[in-house]
Structures are given as C-alpha cells and as structure tokens.
Amino acid sequence: KQEVTQIPAALSVPEGENLVLNCSFTDSAIYNLQWFRQDPGKGLTSLLLIQSSQREQTSGRLNASLDKSSGRSTLYIAASQPGDSATYLCAVRPLSGGNTPLVFGKGTRLSVIA
Amino acid sequence: ETGVTQTPRHLVMGMTNKKSLKCEQHLGHNAMYWYKQSAKKPLELMFVYNFKEQTENNSVPSRFSPECPNSSHLFLHLHTLQPEDSALYLCASGRSTDTQYFGPGTRLTVL
C-alpha cells in the first residue's frame, strides 16, 4: 500500500529565506507526483505536476524535483514571502493510472514571518 | 477559482439530521471525487465516480451516501452522522492522468 510522508510537519522561516520541503513515498510505481497548496479552511490548489519520466518542474519561485527510484521529491521555494504561508501537500498517483485516486501526505505547514 | 464549486461552505447539523453536500464542475472532466480532511490526518479518499459510475468506495460508512446524476454534479447525502464525522469535505474533478481540481470544501460540524 502506497504511503506518503512529508517532513517537516511544520516550518517557520523569516521572509526572504530559501527553503525545501520534503516528500517521500514507499512505492516507486507512480504515474506522477503533484504538489498542492492549501490555505486554512480552503480547498487545494495544484502547484506543480511532475510526470514519472521527468526529473523536475519549475513555476516562478517554485521548483519541484522527483527521484522516483529513491521515492523522494522536494519542493524548493526561493525568496520566501509571507504570502507563501500555507500548508503544502504532496500527492502521488499510483501507476495503474487513469483516474486512480491520489495518495496524499499529511502536509507541511509553512509560516513565513515578515 | 478552480471551476469546482461546493455548497454549502459551512454546515452545522445534529446527529439525527439529514443533509446533502453538493459539488459542481463544468470543466468537462469525467471523474469526480469526495475526500474527507480531518485535523492532523492526510486527506482521505471517500468515493470516486468515473463517467457517473462509482468506481471506488473506500470503506466509507453507509451514513455517507454519494450520488452522481451526471458528470457535472456530485452529491454527498448525510444522515445520522457522528461528532467524529466533523471535518472538511472536499470535492475534486479530473480527467484521466491530469491533475485534480479541488473545490473550496464544506466545513461540516456534527453536534
């Protein structure tokens, strides 16, 4: 059974700092991996989607990497801002593909202090 | 705004009440999902519908009853819930291996 773990559970950094969020998964047979952002009491917003054949994806100040063989992904946030404060969720889609449901981690709660 | 809407946004109900949550998407997606998000737990998949057919029921108690009348609408009917069912209920839609698009959720409190 696929399990997704995110470390740390919570992180507080001063504004302007670069930071890395970690995600690990137990079964490397995945179709893709996604990073989502969730603001308190709100739904999820997709940030980056990495297909299993890809190594990384970039969007603005965000860069996500994927090492499928070792079951790891990182989300790098450059020059953090208070508006980046949110919970970041990692999710994998098992290899059976199609509309197979995503498996989520518990998330990392990020606070960026001005 | 992701194109997936959910109503109501907040709901307080007693254990003997019957209520329904509604989700709507007009993104042309063929799959719709219900998730439950409790405090300090990962998102838990509840139900999956593909082309209006239920393809997954993740051992959800029968007090939760989904309905998918067409590919744009998804309901979650609630009856005789327990306080531990209080959570954020999220609806999502998607197409094949694309990302999933989430609604804003319904914050449910069961008294």
Image: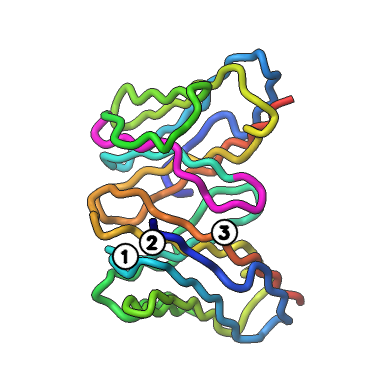
Spatial CA span between label 2 and label 3: 13 Å
Give the amino acid type for the residue marked by disc 2 in the picture.
Answer: Val
Give me the chain letter of mark 2.
A
Q: Residues within 10 Å of mark 1 (few under 14, many from 20)?
A: many
Report the side of B4 relative to A19 (left or right): left
Spatial CA span between label 1 and label 3: 18 Å
| Magenta run includes residue B93 | no
Give the amino acid type for the residue marked by disc 3 in the picture.
Answer: Lys
Give the position of the C terminus of chain A as an image quadrant.
bottom right
Q: Which mark is residue A106?
A: 3
Spatial CA span between label 2 and label 1: 6 Å
Q: Mark 2 or 1 closer to N-term?
A: 1
Q: Relative to A97, is A30 above or below?
A: below
Q: Which mark is residue A32?
A: 1
Q: Position of residue B83 (x, y in %)?
A: 70, 29
Q: Position of residue A57 (x, y in %)?
A: 36, 77
Give the amino acid type for the residue marked by disc 1 in the picture.
Answer: Asn
State yes or no: discs 2 and 1 in contact (Cβ < 8 Å). Answer: yes
Q: Relative to B109, is A9 above or below?
A: below
Q: Mark 2 or 3 closer to N-term?
A: 2
Instruction: Respond whether the residues carrying marks 2 and 3 are from the same subunit.
Output: yes
